[in-house]
Image (spheres, grey):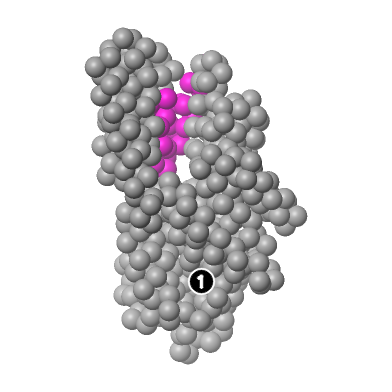
């Protein structure tokens, strides 16, 4: 339990603690009902700065639960405008939630900084489930940074704690989802598919329809990584249809149609994805869509190179080396096709050097 201690507001304290327990256990309907009850007491909450701070922290976590892919760019504005309580638990929650926020915003270096700060206070937390939640959230970051071995380590730690407790089946499924994605990234596709299928099975038993859709995206990703385009599209199209702002599913679906040679369908999805990225202010995927658009338009390789190099400046700032490796390899192949051997060699060598650095970084984790 969150174990917020707010003197003089025992009822609200209990309600906030219960709310966090439901949010953390991914119990969406219970969390929604409790939010409605808590919001009836908003006038009391906002009369106390300390209570307000904890309420808005939890409101942020609630938004992540309901729509983790939504526009959360300004989700911390109200929290940061309030004075921060000085107790260790409040600081821990602030740092952890800030790390989650930066992970969603794809600012992975800031996310890492805040996870480190939260970890420094974790020894003061007696709640074992909070240890599991922390490890699960770090696992997500490690996966996004393409540190697959680290992601597996953290997701396994989290899962081992969740399985010992009743009522955390959805959390177990989410850990298995990260394990599946990470094993797939290591090209252990059978193991990856096994974990993701297990996660979907658990979520279906728990009527977690929206989470099932999100994880079907990951199954689509797994098939796409093996060039099983038709199978990938079957899952991805279901996600993009029911979750029209799921830019990751839209991008993967567009890329698979491009691979199959259905350029018009790919272009249609790219335009849709670019609109979503504009609305959500998501630069990372905006660059992915623009690069794919260049390939779909059959632009001269020099023009595609220009688009990709613009993306590189963003990817470098965000420490997204895996994408730089992927696109340098693509450029090398494109220049080789047109007989520009000098540029092909340049990008093949760059791709090799980046891959080597990624392996070295992963070995240090």
Please tell me which residue lies in front, 87 or 131.
131
Please tell me which residue lies in front, 5 or 152.
152
For the point 55% across and 64% down, the residue is: 158
In the rendering, at what x and y percent does residue 213 appear?
Answer: 63, 44
Please tell me which residue lies in front, 186 or 101.
186
Residue furthest top as drawn: 339
In the rendering, at what x and y percent does residue 243 appear?
Answer: 58, 40
In the rendering, at what x and y percent does residue 143 appear?
Answer: 46, 50
Q: Could you say which quadrant of the image residue 326 lies in?
A: top left
- 206 in relation to 317, above or below: below
* Dominant SS type (magenta): helix
Q: Could you say which quadrant of the image residue 26 lies in?
A: bottom right
Residue 147 appears left or right of 357: right
Q: Label 1: how many residues lie within 10 Å, few (<14), some (14-19) or many (20+)?
A: some
For the point 33% across and 28% down, the residue is: 328
Residue 66 appears left or right of 90: right
- Residue 3 appears in the figure: yes
Please tell me which residue lies in front, 185 or 15.
185
Residue furthest bottom as drawn: 8
Quarter of the picture holding the C terminus:
bottom left
- Residue 241 appears in the figure: no
The residue that mark 1 highlights is 131
- 137 in relation to 231, above or below: below
Q: Could you say which quadrant of the image residue 83 lies in?
A: bottom left
For the point 32% across and 46% down, the residue is: 319
Task: Indicate yes or no whether the magenta region holds residue 221.
Answer: no
Callout 1: SS: helix
Stretch in magenta: 264-292
């Amino acid at each position: 339990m969150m174990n917020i201690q707010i003197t003089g507001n025992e009822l609200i304290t209990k309600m906030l603690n219960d709310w966090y327990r439901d949010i953390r256990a991914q119990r969406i309907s219970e969390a929604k009902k409790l939010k409605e009850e808590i919001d009836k007491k908003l006038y009391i909450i906002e009369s106390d700065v300390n209570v307000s701070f904890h309420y808005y922290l939890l409101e942020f976590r609630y938004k992540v639960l309901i729509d983790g892919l939504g526009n959360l760019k300004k989700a911390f504005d109200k929290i940061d405008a309030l004075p921060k309580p000085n107790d260790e638990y409040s600081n821990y929650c602030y740092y952890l939630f800030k790390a989650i926020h930066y992970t969603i915003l794809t600012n992975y270096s800031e996310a890492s900084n805040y996870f480190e700060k939260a970890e420094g206070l974790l020894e003061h937390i007696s709640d074992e489930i909070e240890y599991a939640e922390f490890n699960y959230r770090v696992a997500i970051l490690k996966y996004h940074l393409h540190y697959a071995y680290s992601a597996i380590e953290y997701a396994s730690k989290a899962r081992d704690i969740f399985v010992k407790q009743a009522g955390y089946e959805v959390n177990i499924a989410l850990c298995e989802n990260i394990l599946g994605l990470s094993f797939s990234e290591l090209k252990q596709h059978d193991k990856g598919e096994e974990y993701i299928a297990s996660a979907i099975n658990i979520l279906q038993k728990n009527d977690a329809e929206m989470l099932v859709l999100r994880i079907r995206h990951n199954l689509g990703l797994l098939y796409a990584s093996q060039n099983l385009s038709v199978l990938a599209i079957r899952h991805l199209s279901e996600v993009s249809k029911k979750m029209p702002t799921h830019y990751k599913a839209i991008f993967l679906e567009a890329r698979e149609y491009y691979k199959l040679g259905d350029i018009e369908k790919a272009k249609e999805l790219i335009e849709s994805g670019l609109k979503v990225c504009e609305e959500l202010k998501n630069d990372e995927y905006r660059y992915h869509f623009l690069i794919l658009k260049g390939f779909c338009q059959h632009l001269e390789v020099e023009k595609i190179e220009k688009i990709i190099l613009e993306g590189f400046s963003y990817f470098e700032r965000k420490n997204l080396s895996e994408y730089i490796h992927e696109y340098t390899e693509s450029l090398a192949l494109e220049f080789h096709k047109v007989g520009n051997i000098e540029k092909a060699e340049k990008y093949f060598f760059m791709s090799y050097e980046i891959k080597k650095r990624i392996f070295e970084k992963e070995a240090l984790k």
